[in-house]
Image: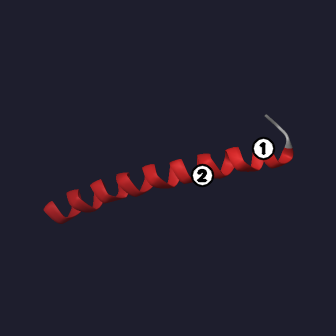
Amino acid sequence: LADLVQLEEENQRLRKRLAEKLRAENAELRKRLGLD
């Protein structure tokens, strides 16, 4: 069970990093398209 909890925590961390990365990418694309 401890392993599972650890996996879950890592999962959350990775999701957060992915979300930040996608947001940055999104902003970049909007700039290129002149949407902002």
Q: Where is residue 27, by image quadrant?
A: top right
Residue shown at the point (75%, 50%) measured from the top left: 29
Q: Amino acid at mark 1?
A: Lys
For the residues labelled 2 and 1, the Cα–Cα distance comes to: 14 Å
Left or right of residue 8: residue 23: right
Q: Position of residue 31 (x, y in %)?
A: 78, 44
Q: Mark 1 and mark 2 in contact (Cβ < 8 Å)?
A: no
Specify few, some or many for label 1: CA neighbours under 10 Å numbering under 14, 14-19, or 20 or more: few
Look at the image and tell me whether residue 1 can be seen.
no
* Residue 31 numbered mark, or none: 1
Q: Position of residue 15 (x, y in %)?
A: 44, 53
Residue shown at the point (77%, 44%) measured from the top left: 30
Left or right of residue 11: residue 15: right
**Image quarter hosting the N terminus:** bottom left
Considering every residue shown, the one lying at the far top of the view is: 36
Residue shown at the point (68%, 48%) measured from the top left: 26
Mark earlier in primary sequence (2, 1): 2
Is 27 in front, or is 16?
27
Q: Where is residue 5, by image quadrant?
A: bottom left
Q: For mark 1, give the secondary structure.
A: helix
Which residue was labeled with disc 2?
A: 22
Specify few, some or many for label 2: CA neighbours under 10 Å numbering under 14, 14-19, or 20 or more: few
Is 1 in front, or is 20?
20
